[in-house]
Amino acid sequence: MRRVPTLLFVSLLPLAASAQQPAQPEGWTGTGELGLAMARGNSRSESLNTRLRFSREEERWKNGFALSALRSRAEVENDVDGDGVEERHYETSANRYDVSGSSAYRFSPRHHVSANGRYERDDFSSYDYQGTLAIGFGSRFIDSERTKLTGEIGPGYRRARTALDGEVQSSLIGRGLLDLRHQLTANTELFNTLLVESGKDNTFAQNDFGVSVAMNERFALKAGLQARHNTEVEDPATRRTDTLTTVNLVYNFR
């Protein structure tokens, strides 16, 4: 994926500038995450995952956007050119990026309306891309000092292209979101986010669960488990569910 070097560079910018705080737009906060694994010796493999998240919350409005990327490749041995001789070379095993944005208006202390957009490309999914736009009604079910639980539900529209035959699908969807944050200790936070986008062609669901441990005001370690599921796959060799386990270094900036 051509964008991976750029994403890596953007993710490392806060780390390089930790000694000199960058000027941030007033009211905006965010995090940058980076996880990298490399194996050398009898086997060779590389894996990179990175995330950027920004949000700004005012008395009535909350805006945010997020970007994530995953790329993995490993050395394999097979007959590439058909000459009967096996050769070692790298093969990409994961190549995905996802961008999303949202804007919410709070009309009461616990209730809001929102507009949301999401777009993803995945070379190893049953869909080349999926793009959704949705509006929703949201509520803060729990809003205490340690625990926050927010939910959203509403209609939307999805456009996607299948990987097997290139068919473009367009349909109305129902979108649901549950977002849980719980402060276990002064420096340890548990989180779980469930997103469901369901239409006549496919139901997409993604659940992100993890724990973040702050080392200081700026840096934290975050362990996470992500599960992604598509109900409809055309290729029998393609699995409906993908999981991703990560341990990332997190940089918080304000």
Image: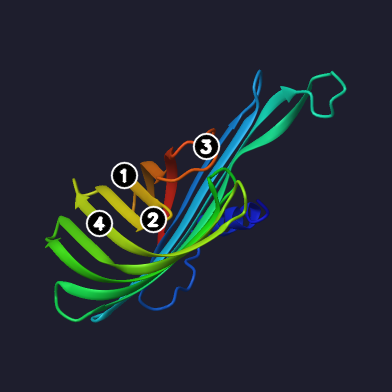
- Contact between marks 1 and 2 (CB within 8 A): the answer is no
In percent of width and height, residue 243 lies at 42, 38
Of the numbered discs in the image, which one, if any, rests on residue 238? 3
Q: Amino acid at mark 1?
A: Phe
Q: Which one is nearer the viewer's eye here, 236 or 121? A: 236
Q: Is residue 60 left or right of residue 201?
A: left
Q: Kindly identify which residue carries mark 2.
A: 218
Mark 4 or mark 2, earlier in chain: 4
Question: Residue at left 55%, top 39%?
Answer: 235
Judged by depth in the image, the label closer to the viewer, 3 or 2, is 3
Question: Residue at left 57%, top 43%?
Answer: 124
Judged by depth in the image, the label closer to the viewer, 1 or 2, is 1
In percent of width and height, residue 189 lies at 25, 48
> Quick one: label 1, few (<14), some, or many (20+) residues within 10 Å?
some
Estimate the spatial distance between the alpha carbons at disc 1 and disc 2, rounded to whole Å: 22 Å
Mark 3 or mark 4, earlier in chain: 4
Mark 4 or mark 1, earlier in chain: 4
Q: Kindly identify which residue carries mark 4.
A: 178
Q: Kindly identify which residue carries mark 1.
A: 209
